[in-house]
Amino acid sequence: MNRLVVIGSVIADQLMTVPRLPDRGGDVLAGPVATQAGGAFNIAAAAVRLGLPTALCGRVGTGPLGDLLAHALADLGVEALLPRDPSGDSGTCIGLVEPDGERTFVTSPGVEQGLTDDDLASVGWRADDAVYLSGYDLVYPTTGPAVARWLAGFRPGTLLIDPGPLVAEIPAAVLDAALAAATVLSLNERELDLLGEEPGGALTTLWPRLADGAVVVARVGAEGAWLHRRGAEPELVGSIAVDVVDTTGAGDAHAGALLAGLADGLTLPAAVRRANAAAALAVTRLGSATGPTRDELSAVLT
């Protein structure tokens, strides 16, 4: 692969630390609000920091949030494959981070939810492109069906799909089209459970929905990730021990590092091991786009 194309929603994350989640109808006092680029930006940042050229196929608005995101993408060196959308602003996500690092989100979409068939057709796709696709975008009523139709006519050389926490809300036809095209399915324990499976299990319901050469990477936090390959026993690939500060963006750092590792020619287990370490380092920092650099990864993997 020569580049990574992120199909997804770049949104503004507004993160705050809380002592606990409020009771229904209640309130808690939070720490200062940190507003930063997030969503699909986290994937792009993780990949770029590890040397993988990255482009965005996603809509960015023209309001104050869109301006913040456009500047962040430009500063990172991510190529924008679509023009700015003049119809409105980009969306935002409120993130509540508890003392143990667990996070809870509320997302208000903006123009990024409106990716169309014409948008996808306007991109100069390359046969060796690696593509990242998030389940958030598959949920959107315009983007999801458009992506499903696009996948019927073009299959990227590498397609990593992260179904995300809204996997149960993805329309069945859209999810089936995405799974059938995926070369890598990366998801956490909760998401795997929503698909009727468990880490280290036989994946009896998932394998029939995936292409023959597809692999499944089931992330299990501090333990690392289970690597599932058809016809082989599941393999637990370990991680490194860290002190958790904020788990926001851990899965994004993992996906970006996994794709960068594959682009570097690593074997699949080695790429998963590096991705596990990248996710571990990411959770030691407050914020969403906290994937490490090559030097930081090398320091913990030697």
Image (spheres, rainbow, N blue to C red):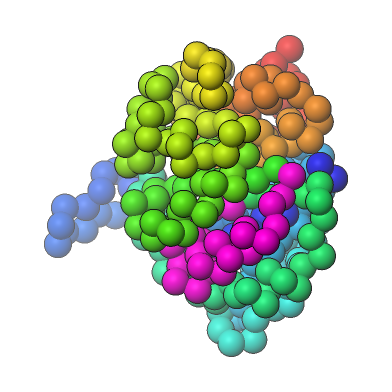
Q: Which residues are magenta?
A: 133-157
Residue 153 covered by magenta stretch: yes
Residue in the foreground of this view, choosing between 118 and 149: 149
Residue located at (40% from left, 22% from top): 202
The part of the image, by quadrant, that contains residue 257 is top right
Residue located at (29% from left, 54% from top): 29
Furthest residue toward bottom: 87
Magenta portion: prevailing SS class = helix
Left or right: 138, with 263 as reference point? left
The part of the image, by quadrant, that contains residue 106 is bottom left
Residue located at (76% from left, 24% from top): 266
Residue 293 at what x, y percent from top left?
Answer: 74, 34
Q: Is residue 107 visible?
A: yes
Residue 200 covered by magenta stretch: no
- Compared with residue 296, is residue 106 higher up or lower down, i.e. above or below? below
The part of the image, by quadrant, that contains residue 273 is top right
Residue located at (81% from left, 47% from top): 128
Left or right: 85, with 227 as reference point? right
Q: Is residue 236 visible?
A: no
